[in-house]
Amino acid sequence: MKRERPEADGETFATRSGLPLEPCYGPESVRSPPPPPGAFPFTRGIHPTMYRGKPWTMRQYAGFGTPAETNERFRYLLAQGQTGLSLALDLPTQLGLDSDDPEAEGEVGKVGVAIDSLDDMEAVFEGIPLGQVSTSMTINATASILLAMYEAAATRQGVPPERIAGTVQNDLLKEFGARGAWIFPIDPSMRLAVDVIEDCVGRLPRFNPISVASHYRDAGASPAEELAYTLAAGTTYVRACLDRGIPVDRFAPRLSFFFYTYTNFFEEVAKYRAGRRLWATLMRDRFGAKEPQSLAMRIACVCGGHSLTRAEPLGNVARTTLETLAVACAGVQSVFTAAHDEAFAIPTELSARTALRVQQIVAQETEVAKVADPLGGSYFVEALTDAMEDRGREILDELEARGGMVECLRSGLVQQRIARGAYEQQRAIESGAQPLVGVNYPPGLPPAGARGEEPDGIATQRLSRTAAMEKAKALARLRRGRDAGRVELSLFRLADEARGTQNLMAPIREAVLAYATVGEIARTLRQVFGIYQPPTAF
Amino acid sequence: MAARRIRVLIGKPGLDGHDRGARVVAMALRDAGMEVVYSGLRASVAQLASAAEQEDVDVIGLSVLSGAHLSACRRLIEELRRRGIEIPLVLGGVIPKEDHEELRRLGVAAIFGPESPLEEIVRTVSGLGFNGGSDR
C-alpha cells in the first residue's frame, strides 16, 4: 500500500517545548494513573466534580478610555452573560502616573481605562454590585493603590471589605522578567507585593492578593519554561511570606496563578495537569503546607495572546476555540478568551461579544463542563503530563541551582533565554518549520503584507482622542475640591512608613480616602524606593 | 577599506513594556551584520535622540504596541530636527492602517507589522542605512 506522506529520514516530531512525540501511545507509556479529581496532587483538577459544582468564571479583559466608557463596556459584557469582570488599566495607571503627567502623553486610556483617583474607580463600577460580582485587575506595581481604591469604592456601595471578591495580579517578578510594567527596584517591589498579600489575608478573605502570572510565555518562553518560571516565581513569593512570619496555611490558600494558552492543544492540557501536580508537591514537601486548599493550584488563563495572527484574523476564532476547549479540558478556574482582532487594536463590541460566545459555546454545547478531567486516562495525555512534569522540574531545579528566580532575573538570564526563544520561534515561522495557517501555510502563500491591505471583517475600535483632555480636566477639578492638607499629611505619613518596615496598606488606604491620586501616591513611594534599572542586553 | 557596518538604534519609547518584537528585530539585524543598540524600555524622546547622536546610528527603529505611535514619532522627529540630525526612522508594532498616511507624512520611512518577515525588515533597514551612510 502506498503511504500518502512518507516520513522523511530523520524527521522527528516534538511539542513546542521539545518533548518528543511518539506515533502512538499505549499503557506502557504511562507511569501510574493519577488519583481522582479533588485529591492530592490535583493532577485531574482541584474539585471532585469540577465544573458541575463550580463552572469556570468567564472573565473577559476589558477597559479603555474614560471610566464612563469602561463602565458601559462592563455592563454590556455582563448583559451578554459574562460571569466576572477583568479590568484593563492604561499604562500610566499601571506605572503610577496621573493622566496629566507629561510622561503619560499619548498613552491615556489606550490599552485600558485611566484611573487617577477614587472618583474614577467609583465611576467604573457605577451600578455594578460589587458584593455579587468579582473583579480581576491586571495591576502590579500599583496593585496596592488600586486595591485600596476598589475596596473604598465597594464600601461606598455598602459592601463591606470581607465580602468583596476578586484578584489583583500583584506579581512583580514577571514584570522584571517579561512584561516590563515595573516601577520600583526588586526588593521594595517584593515588599509591596507581600504587604498586599498580608493585608488581604487579614482583612479581605475573599480576595486573591496575587496571581502569579506567566507572561514569560507571550514574550517567547516555551510551555515548559513558562510553567517552570511561573512556579519558580510562586515559590519566591511563598518564601517572602514565610519570611514575613505569615503561617503557610494562612496565605497559601489565597495564592492564584495565571497562564497563557496557545493552539498546541494536548501540550497545553498536559501543562496545566503537570503544573498542579508540581505545585501541590512543592507546597507539601518544601514548605510543609497541610491544608488541601494550600496545595490546590487555582488557575486563571488567557486564550490567545501571541498565538493570534494579524493575517486572516477570522481564523483566530478557530484558534481561541481550540484554546478555550483545551483549558476547559485542563480544569482551570477562570478564562479570558481573547478577541480575534487582538493583533489590530482593543476589541470592538462585536469582537468582544464573539470572544465571550466562544466560551459559552464550549461550556454549553460540548460535554466538557459535565465531566471532570475528560482527557484523564488517555495514554497520550497522561504520558505528556508526566513528560511535562519532568521537564518543568528540571528547569525549576536549574533556576534553583543558579540562585533562584530573583537572581536569574537580576542577571538577565531569564530575559535573554526568553528573547532567544522568541527569535527562534520567529525564524521557525519564517522558514515554514512551524506552520501558521494564513501566515506561512499553505506553502507559497505570499507574505501577509503583500496580499492587499485590510483583512476580512475587521473594523478596529477607535479610541476617543478626548479621553486625555477629559481626564486632565477631572484631575484639575479633583485637586481644587479636595482637602489639600489631608492629602499632604497622608502622603507624608506614607513616605515616613515606607522608610520603615511597616505594612504600607494602611497609609495607602488613608491616602486614597483623602483623594490622593495614583500618581501622587506612586511618586511618594518612588522618592523613597527609587526606580528599577533593567539589564538592556539582548 | 572595509565598508562601515550599518549602525541601528532600536528604541522602545513610551510606557509599553512588551519588547518581544523589539528584541527579535534587534537580533535579526545583528545577525545580518549590523551593529545594534537597544534603548531598553520607556526611553524618552530626548534619550533616543541623544543615543542616536552619540552612537552615530544610520537608522532608528521604533517599536510601539500601545497605540502611542503617532505622538511618539511626531515628538522624536521634532526632537531630531531641533538638534539638526537627519536619520531615517522606521516603525514597527500594532499600527492601524488609518494612521499610515499620517506617519508617512511625518517622515516615517517604513512601517512594519506583526507579520512583516524579518528578511524584509533587514532589507529595508539595510537599504536605508546604506543610503544614510553614504552621505557621511
Image (cartoon, coloured by chain):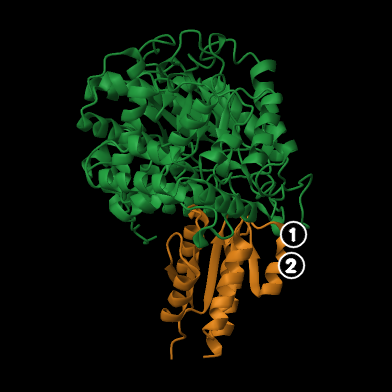
Chain colours: A green, B orange
Drawn side of residue A38 relative to residue A2, left or right = left
- Report in which chain the residue with disc 2 lies: B
Q: Mark number for residue A281?
A: none
Categorize mark 2 by other alpha carbons within 10 Å: few (<14), some (14-19), many (20+).
few
Q: Which mark is residue B98?
A: 1
Residue A120 horizontal/vertical position (percent): 56, 41
Name the residue at 28% across, 40% down: A191
Which amino acid type is shown beneath numbered disc 1? Glu
Residue B96: which quarter of the image?
Answer: bottom right
Q: Give the structural element (helix, strand or loop) at label 1.
A: helix
Q: Secondary structure at mark 2?
A: helix
Q: Do callouts 1 and 2 mark residues in contact (Cβ within 8 Å)?
A: yes
Residue A536 spot, x, y in % from top left: 37, 61
**Which quadrant does the N terminus of chain A fall into?**
top right
Q: Which residue is found at the position 59% from the left and 48% from the top? A: A111
Q: Read off the residue under disc 2.
A: B101
- Cα gap from disc 1 to disc 2, whole angstroms: 7 Å
Res A274 quadrant in image = top left
Q: How many other residues sit within 10 Å of disc 1, few (<14), some (14-19) or many (≥20)?
A: few
Q: Is residue A227 above or below residue A93?
A: above
Residue at 73% across, 48% down: A460
Q: Nearer the viewer, residue A362 or A469?
A: A469
Relative placement, left or right, of A320 versus A202 is: right
Of residue A301 and residue A245, the one placed in the foreground of this image is: A245
- Residue A95 can be seen in this image: no
- Residue B116 position in % (x across, y down): 63, 59
Q: Amino acid at mark 2?
A: Glu
Spot occupied by residue A69 in the image (x, y as percentages of width and height) = 67, 41
Which quadrant is the C terminus of chain A positioned in?
bottom left
